[in-house]
Amino acid sequence: MADEGQFKNYNNVPVYTIKTVVQETGIPPATLRAWERRYGVLTPGRSDGGYRLFSERDIAVLRWLKHQVDSGVSISRAAALLELRDQAGETVQVAPATSADASKTSALSPGGVHSPAAIAEALLEVLLAFREPQAEVILGEAFALYPVEVVVEEIVARLLTEVGERWHRGEVTVVQEHFITDFLRRRLMVLFHTANQPAAGPLAITAAAPSEWHDLGILIVSLALRREGWRVIPLGQNVPVESLLAEVRKLRPSLVCLSATTGESIGALRQVYDAVREMSEPRPQLVFGGRVFNLHPELRSAFPGAYLGASAREFVAHIAQRKY
Ligand code: B12
């Protein structure tokens, strides 16, 4: 929690009601309570009637936390950062409140703690209407309430799959699908690039299989690996077999993770699989995953040892038990 050293220019007298704090910060009451309970970031006083009262300093701390969360930092990390900076006596820059913040209202009913499914639904609704500022607010609330892994798997991935199904049924236009995919991809990229890349440690190369433009699944896997302390080199979409193998031979990673969404990628995966098995030691471990393996389990046995889970979370749990 911030002390005098951090927010010393702010008055510490608890005078503001929760309603004022919500208006000033744009943070919903349920989120405020969750932050207070889980991360101990506030120390409100009490009015004579027993209502919680907050100080100017509390509001400043909350604005700073919200700014971090809106920039893609998880609330747990932002709270830890606040404490660390506090201990180190560094200055914490407080994001100024803007009139734009006040105009962004969430599509979620105020005051409730929403399930990931409810958040995904609300997010889908505003994104289908191209309401990007509202989508930012909803996603901000999601990151405030749930760990990054839950937001990514149970909100972002769920929403993408739902969009795909609706597009297939003709209920969502290509333009809506592109807009939504692009919005979520940008947020995933921010998360990936703001996650710590360790200077040393095991190296993983990740890529969408040759001929695959679907790279969101492998981006989620890359993010999960990086958050587990792996050095990750993401090669992106549609990586040609020979270029991929050239990098693998040069960089000698511990892991090579490839994602396949459609069946057309299987032939290329076979080429990579055979080539890696012929490599001299130290040979990387090759791992495949993605929608096509989840839909067609028989494909998993076609590549012995290469399938380690239906989701990024399952995969990370699996490799955590191994030594690299
Ligand atoms: C977004 C999207 C696109 C975007 C992709 C943008 C991007 N940068 O990724 C664009 C517009 C480019 C696109 C193009 C196409 N698409 Co598309 N697309 C989708 C959509 C809506 C979402 C895909 C997605 O991101 N899912 C969410 C991610 C997170 O899920 P995931 O990939 O399965 O990943 C999870 C797990 O599988 C696992 N995982 C993934 N990789 C790995 C790797 C390892 C190592 C491990 C362990 C685990 C793992 O972890 C992830 C997180 O849990 C799907 C709908 C759907 N049902 O999936 C259609 C869908 C996949 N597309 C489809 C089609 C048909 C196409 C096109 C052929 C359309 C066209 N006519 O041009 C082209 C194909 C281009 C190509 N050659 O790749 C079909 C595929 C049908 C099929 N053949 O099986 C789908 C299913 C839509 C549908 N219902 O028909 N698409």
Image (cartoon, rainbow, N blue to C red):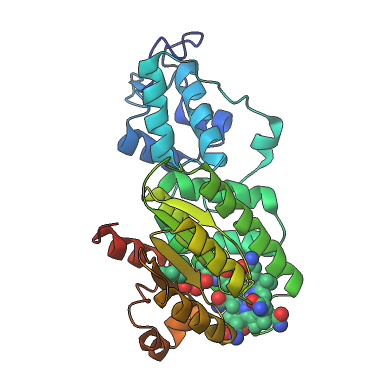
Which residue sits at x=40%, y=77%? 277
The image quadrant where one finds ligand 1 is bottom right
Which residue sits at x=52%, y=35%? 68
9 versus 312 height, above or below:
above
Left or right: residue 87 compared with residue 266: left
Which residue sits at x=39%, y=87%? 297
Left or right: residue 6 compared with residue 163: left
Residue located farthest toward the front when viewing the structure as drawn: 280
Residue nearest the viewer, comparing 104 with 88: 88
Residue nearest the viewer, comparing 320 with 33: 320
Residue 298 picture location, percent across and down:
39, 91
239 versus 205 height, above or below:
below
Residue nearest the viewer, comparing 200 with 264: 200
Residue 120 picture location, percent across and down:
52, 62
Quadrant the N terminus occupies = top left
Residue 145 picture location, percent across and down:
42, 47
Residue 243 picture location, percent across and down:
61, 67
Residue 200 can be seen, yes or no: yes
Residue located farthest toward the right when viewing the structure as drawn: 175
229 versus 26 height, above or below:
below
Quadrant the C terminus occupies = bottom left
Number of numbered discs on residues: 0
Residue 167 can be seen, yes or no: no
The quadrant holding residue 4 is top left
Which residue sits at x=38%, y=16%? 88
The quadrant holding residue 286 is bottom left
